[in-house]
Amino acid sequence: MATLQLARTISQLRKEQPAITLILARNKNQNLVVYEAVRNEQKTVLQGLKAYWLDLEPELQAQHRAQGHKDYKADFAVWDHYAYGFTYVPVTALTGTLTLKQAPQFPLQIQVAPSGMKTYYTEGGTTLEVSHVYVQAQEGLTPLTTKVQFLELQGINVQTKQPQSLRHTFF
């Protein structure tokens, strides 16, 4: 998915679904991994997170429609929990820490905000309000042998209010 198209898609998703906490895009295809907040009925207490696929590939969307689904969400397969799984640790009723299993060195701080969920990453005095994470991976013979080349957190620098990305290379 082209960068501008991806940015528009993510912006639209966040407007339509304010519980979205994080979106992960990959180089493999247009499908996204969505991490969504589970909140109480009043939407004032953060109770946890759930993750799922948002299938944006045209052939997968056609399959969803043919099966009578009204959305393009799909549950994780067993191996997806290895690649895209996470841990969530509550800090307060409104905040918590989200850590991706494949990137434990990059904990993300999440919080309930009036406009929806906010996700932050801080490194070396710079805090980024994260829009999404892009993952560049080299496909292996199986999902378990796929290697992440780099992970790029994209969003707005909280201090400067300018777009910024932070890239971390693994090999």
Image (spheres, helix red, strand yellow):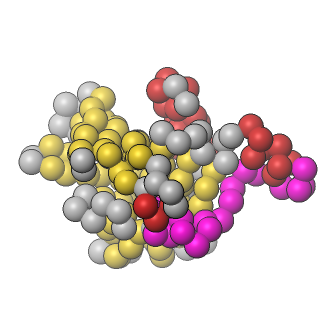
When the figure is inspected, residue 86 is found, relative to residue 53, above or below; the finding is below
Q: Position of residue 109 (x, y in %)?
A: 30, 60
Q: Is residue 141 left or right of residue 86?
A: right
Q: Is residue 141 magenta?
A: no
State which quadrant residue 79 falls in.
bottom right
When the figure is inspected, residue 140 is found, relative to residue 150, above or below; the finding is below
Q: How many numbered callouts?
A: 0
The boundaries of the magenta stretch are: 66-84
Q: Residue at x 90, y 50 (%)?
A: 66
Hey, which residue is sitting farthest left in the picture?
Answer: 124
Q: Position of residue 126 (x, y in %)?
A: 15, 43
Pick the residue in front: 51 or 93: 51
When the figure is inspected, residue 75 is found, relative to residue 28, above or below; the finding is below
Looking at the image, can residue 11 be seen? Answer: yes
Q: Is residue 163 left or right of residue 62?
A: left
Q: Is residue 128 left or right of residue 113?
A: left
Q: Residue at x 61, y 56 (%)?
A: 53
